[in-house]
Image: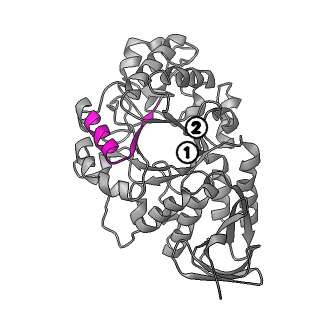
Amino acid sequence: MADDTSTDLRKLQIYSVFVRNHTQAGTLKALEADLPRIKALGTDFIWLLPINPVGEVDRKGKLGSPYSIKDYRKIDPAQGTWDDFIHLAEQIHRQGMKLMIDIVYNHTSRDSVLLKQHPEYFLHDEQGKLFNKNPEWSDVAELDYSNHDLWNYQIETLKQYAKIVDGFRCDVAPQVPLPFWLEARKEVAEVKPNIVWLAESTGGDYIRDIRSKGFWISSDGEIYRAFDLAYDYDIDQDWHEYLAGKTSLSEYVKVLNRQDLTFPANYIKMRNLENHDHERAHELFPNLNDLINWTAFSEFQKGATLVYAGQEFGLKETPSLFDADKLNWHTSVDLSKMIKRMHELSQDEIQVNGSCQLTSFENDIVKVSFSKGNSKRIGIFSLKSNNGRVKTTIKDGEYMNLLSHETVDVTNGVIQIAGEPVIIETGSLHKK
């Protein structure tokens, strides 16, 4: 991990916006009206999916993927102008939030400015044809970082954006060689030293596949040398196996606990239940009470939090990346207050730098325990909305649930769980 990364970044709540689908207008200007509501969720960073022009050659869908970028240094005219981008950044800052943009440096579109001007910057096969490490990405051309002239172009682009934004979310960061990211971080710091770097890291099977083809791809342990935060895709397969009933909660909890031993002491995972590449949480958890427990559990884990736009209203449809697919904001679900409260709790020192341990119980109930000095804070989440009994070392008595403000009774070291999330701490003890 970057040696100077502060564990305070575990306090972050990042709100992800796909500008094209977020409003009916689909523009940077139209997004500004929603900033106060986004801020009220507890948002620290707004992360914009790519807002650059999209390529037309081999385009997928009518509008194409925002990750098939035609020009890194331009704004998609359908979304606005460079001045609109600067104005949005100013408005985000006035709301007390920061701005993170998507950096897509593994590839460009197949008709990009860079490909036309510098075809030598791209991977080619023995016949001289464009070559992709990932054949499924048929709408893009992959870059070749063995050419150091490419480094100069890419870093200069980052420096231009660093004058405006506060963070970079780097798409498929592990496939871009680590030495490039180390150099980029060093040089960008000369423009803005406190830029936050988030890596879209990846899972073990994908790492194994790319390495088997003879190409560079970083593990999370490596990526942390250059980045402040990384996705929790290292446990994504384990998570989905648990959801599918292929493994037990106890096995999944073992993997989560192992993260604390695998990565540096100041590691920061970005915890998320959904994002633009995966199904919506409410689709995964149709039962609303399950969704509530999983949302609270995800945000109570050690690390930063991602909220994908619409998640707070329980949207079930994953918006298309390739066609117009406006968000439907009118639902009967509203998790906004809970998300805000979970963010408030995440600001406390015990959750930032306390020791963290997860424990599984029968009936798919999980306990997350934070401790620092003589203080303890525990969260208990019934992932399938079951009732159950949870053992704890907290002193017997009546406590206030920090999430619902209801009373929680601890008797003989046991808490009776009735399917609702519970968060208590030693300081909330009341006399019986």
- Which residue shows up at 68% across the image and 55% down it? 354
Front position in the image: 223 or 323: 223
**What residue span does the magenta drawing correspond to?**
85-104
Q: Is residue 323 above or below residue 158?
A: below
Front position in the image: 409 or 267: 409
Spatial separation of the CA atoms under disc 1 and disc 2:
8 Å
The location of residue 426, given as percent across then percent down, is 67, 71
Q: What residue type is disc 1 on?
A: Leu
The location of residue 191, given as percent across then percent down, is 44, 23
Name the residue that disc number 2 marks. 228
Residue 315 is at least partly visible in this image: no
SS under mark 1: helix
Front position in the image: 76 or 413: 413
Q: Are marks 1 and 2 in contact (CB under 8 Å)?
A: yes
Q: What residue type is disc 2 on?
A: Asp
SS under mark 2: loop
Mark 2 Cα within 10 Å, few/some/many (few <14, many 20+)?
A: many
Residue 262 shown left or right of residue 382 in the figure: right
Question: Looking at the rendering, in which quadrant would you find the C terminus?
Answer: bottom right
Query: Of callouts 1 and 2, which one flags the residue occurring earlier in the amino acid sequence?
Result: 1
The outermost residue toward the bottom is 432
- Which residue shows up at 60% across the image and 32% down it? 174
Q: Which mark is residue 9?
A: 1
The location of residue 123, given as percent across then percent down, is 53, 19
Residue 129 shown left or right of residue 92 in the figure: right
